[in-house]
Image (cartoon, grey):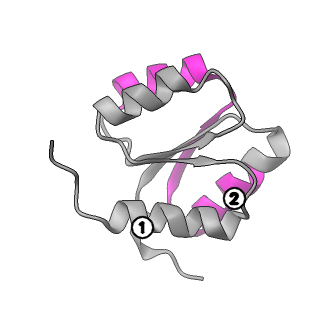
């Protein structure tokens, strides 16, 4: 399936085993996204704090330390999806939906 809303977007992939992170990263890159992957929540927090170009994030929902990161993503209005077992295609569709939606205004 084509995912035009991902093309040229900067996506942060956080957590996961190396195999799962590679599957997600490969699918996002094939869709034309620029991907940064890290297994460290603290590294992801630093990236989210200092990368003004971050379009979205995919966060491993099984990582118990993700609350600080998800809170920061919310504060910075960076769309994110917690991924914990669904297929990569479902994840891509969820990201498509988040990035295609108009920005939320508080």
Magenta stretch: dominant SS? Answer: helix
Do the numbered discs 1 and 2 sit on residues whose CB atoms are within 8 Å? no
Image check: 16 left or right of 80? right
Label 2 belongs to which residue?
A: 26
Residue drawn at (75%, 53%) of the image: 85
Quadrant assignment, res 59 = top right
Q: In the rendered image, which quarter contains the N terminus?
A: bottom right
- Visible in this render: residue 7? no
Instruction: For label 1, count other residues whose C-alpha is less than 10 Å away and answer few (under 14), some (14-19) or many (20+).
Output: few
Label 1 belongs to which residue?
A: 97
Q: Magenta residues?
A: 22-51
User: Residue 25 location, x and y as percent?
Assistant: 66, 52
Q: Earlier in the sequence, mark 1 or mark 2?
A: 2
- Residue 30: within the magenta? yes
Describe the element under mark 2 as helix, strand or loop.
Answer: helix
Between circles 1 and 2, the one closer to the viewer is 1
User: Residue 42 location, x and y as percent?
Assistant: 57, 16
User: Residue 82 location, x and y as percent?
Assistant: 58, 45
């Amino acid at each position: 399936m084509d995912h035009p809303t991902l093309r040229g977007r900067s996506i942060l992939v956080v957590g996961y085993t190396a195999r799962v992170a590679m599957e997600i990263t490969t699918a996002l890159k094939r869709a034309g996204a620029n991907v940064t992957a890290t297994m460290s929540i603290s590294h992801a927090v630093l990236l989210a704090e200092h990368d003004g170009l971050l379009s979205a994030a995919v966060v491993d929902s099984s990582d118990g330390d993700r609350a600080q990161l998800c809170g920061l993503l919310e504060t910075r209005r960076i769309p994110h999806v917690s991924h914990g077992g669904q297929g990569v295609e479902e994840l891509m569709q969820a990201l498509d939906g988040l990035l295609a939606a108009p920005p939320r205004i508080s």
